[in-house]
Amino acid sequence: MQPSRSLRILTISAFLLVLLSLYMVFVYAPREVVMGAVQRVFYYHVAAGWIGALAFLVTLIVSILYLATNNIILDRIAVSSVEIGVVFTSMNIASGSIWARPIWNTWWTWDPRLTTATVMWLLYIAYLMLRQGLEDPERQRRFAAVYGILAFASVPLTFLAIRIWRTIHPVVIGSNDPGAEGQFDMTMRMRSAFFFSLFTFTVLYTTLLWHRVRLEGLACRVAIMKARLLHDR
Amino acid sequence: MPDPTNSQPPTAGFWRAVSAIAWKDLAAELRNKEIVSALFIFSLLVILIFNFALELDKVARENVAAGVLWVTFVFSATLGLNRTFAAEKDRGSLDGLLLAPIHRSALYFGKLLSTFVFILIVEIIVIPVFSVLYNISLFSPPFLLVVLLGTLGYAMVGTLLAAMAIHTRAREVMLPILLFPVAVPVVMAAVRASAGILAGAEWGRFAGAFNLVVIYDTIMLAIAIMTFDYLIEE
Amino acid sequence: MIEIHSLSKSFGLKPVLRGIDLSVAPGEFVALLGPNGAGKTTLLRIVATLSRPDTGEVKVGGLSLTTHAYAVRQLLGVVSHQLLLYGELTAEENLRFYARMYGLGAAEARISAVLDQVGLARQRRDLVRTFSRGMQQRLAIARATLHQPQVMLFDEPHTGLDQDAATMLDDVLRSVTAAGRTVMMITHDLARGLALSDRVAILRRGKIACEADSSTLTPAAFADQYYGLVHA
């Protein structure tokens, strides 16, 4: 079973875009004056964060739709999106940590954005563990959909809770908030590099999602064929 | 898909069913007097452990009091939540509840109510003990209100997730894994608001935290009502 | 009273029921038999509204399960081999709980009546966890008949009972089903199933393999037929 032509084109495009974005980030964009080379992490860090959030938003939408329509493809999209979202969020957290180390001399900071990202990561790991722990496939899909909705609803509330917390406990880590884009002045080139990597990641997400959903569909077909072989007499 | 509504939805019987389930849970659990004393001892132990683990002077103690209290509540609540559906499923008595001609969400509210009362009993024990041991007065109405609302939020989400967790293989572990990340906002906000009240801070300083607890409770209740049906039907 | 058309159910990818057609007339007692894994319990659970079918339709008392689930539940009394009783409560507390769940008026009178019917009136204030298996099963029947359902479903009620208890249960079953109730009972006991029922049906691998009038069969003939089918 070959992937469809559109998927193959998309995959190649994604690959090329990644190469191109590497060029833009490491060559095209100028070296930032204050932070130095490590600032380049920013281009991927923020993009990864946004795509992670996008992935979970997609999961929310398909989860609601799945409960309404019982269409199994929606469930495949949900689980695929969560898996990819976890990957991107991991990248987000890891790159944030890498950025933080030379800038503020610490691997970690409990600032709202990073903490929210971590809680989000935990939520979606929990989602995957929930699916793992349920044997009945129909129940797995149903429960996962409900958890997907609950999890997403809690993310903005978590962000607010941490923000409120921090305004009263001003733990001074450094003068800079790592997530804020306006931290350093972005030149035109930097801006292009940033938006390009964002675009690249979006395409990458879509490609991975499509592949993963397709994989899930194939796995399902195999399971059906296997069951038919075993149970039909 | 959830249970489609009958031509005559039994609204009259809703609260009757809720109170019947809650009463049944509490009677069955509390009749076993061991549970009450076990909870009491458990709460004492948690407080003691914190005392030794944290080694604090008076000022520091006041600062962490709210946090320590809430951790105690969260642990006890999680234990209580585990029992809520576990016994029903193990004994198969969940079927008995599903066979009754009641609205499915009556089951949710009944369980929520009994779990909530259960946790409240623990809190009623813990708060005075804590007051005495830490020499802090905890009997201010605003503080107790925050405790109530925060506990309610935790219980609401916990009941929903407990209904999911009992079907999993490692159910005692699964519930905290599912619950803690989702409960982060309400626990943080409740701790913040509690700490503010205990420190005698003015309303404006922790109003945000208090409001967040209320908002959280409302949103989660709405989600629970809308999704519980999907969890309970086979 | 019970109409089942083309009922199918799979758990995951494993088909358990493959197109069941069965009708039970009002007041009829049908015994459902079959080897383990044939789908008997699944079938009963679907009729009891505890499980939803994948395809097909089930009607109880003319009401479709999918659209009138609440009304159907009011008509059903279910006794499974999993007791739906709470050990920490007394017999009458258990019954009171279910009376409230079913919204019964004059609950106390009903509770006393069913306890008398199953012969547990003297143990009404005892905790259920002190009951023997036979007593628990009888209380389960009391619970199931509390709201005077027109249809009763039994899933292997004789499981774990000794001879005496089983005979007592039969008496209770006869008195309960004499009241014109429609009954569907799953059992492994061929002779008993034949003796109690009006009609027998054998389920095999998710399909009804055979149905027959109980009065036309002797226990020996039935046993032959059963084993012939099951070991085919």
Image (cartoon, rainbow, N blue to C red):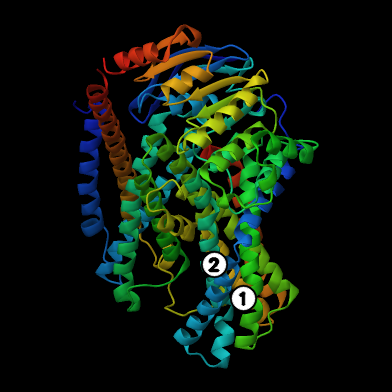
The reply to whether residue A193 is in sight is yes
Residue at 52% across, 56% down: B83
Q: Do callouts 1 and 2 mark residues in contact (Cβ within 8 Å)?
A: yes
SS under mark 2: helix
Q: Which residue lies most toward the right here? A: C106
Q: Quadrant of residue A16?
A: top left
Write down the residue under mark 1. B126
Relative to B142, is A152 on the left or the right? left
The reply to whether residue A192 is in sight is no
Which residue type carries mark 2? Answer: Ser
Which residue type carries mark 1? Answer: Val
- Coordinates of residue B113 in the picture (x, y in percent): 66, 54
Residue at 55% across, 26% down: C153
Relative to B207, is B233 on the left or the right? left
Residue at 21% across, 53% down: A23
Q: Earlier in the sequence, mark 1 or mark 2?
A: 2
Task: Work out whether C125 lies above or below A216.
Answer: below
Write down the residue under mark 2. B76
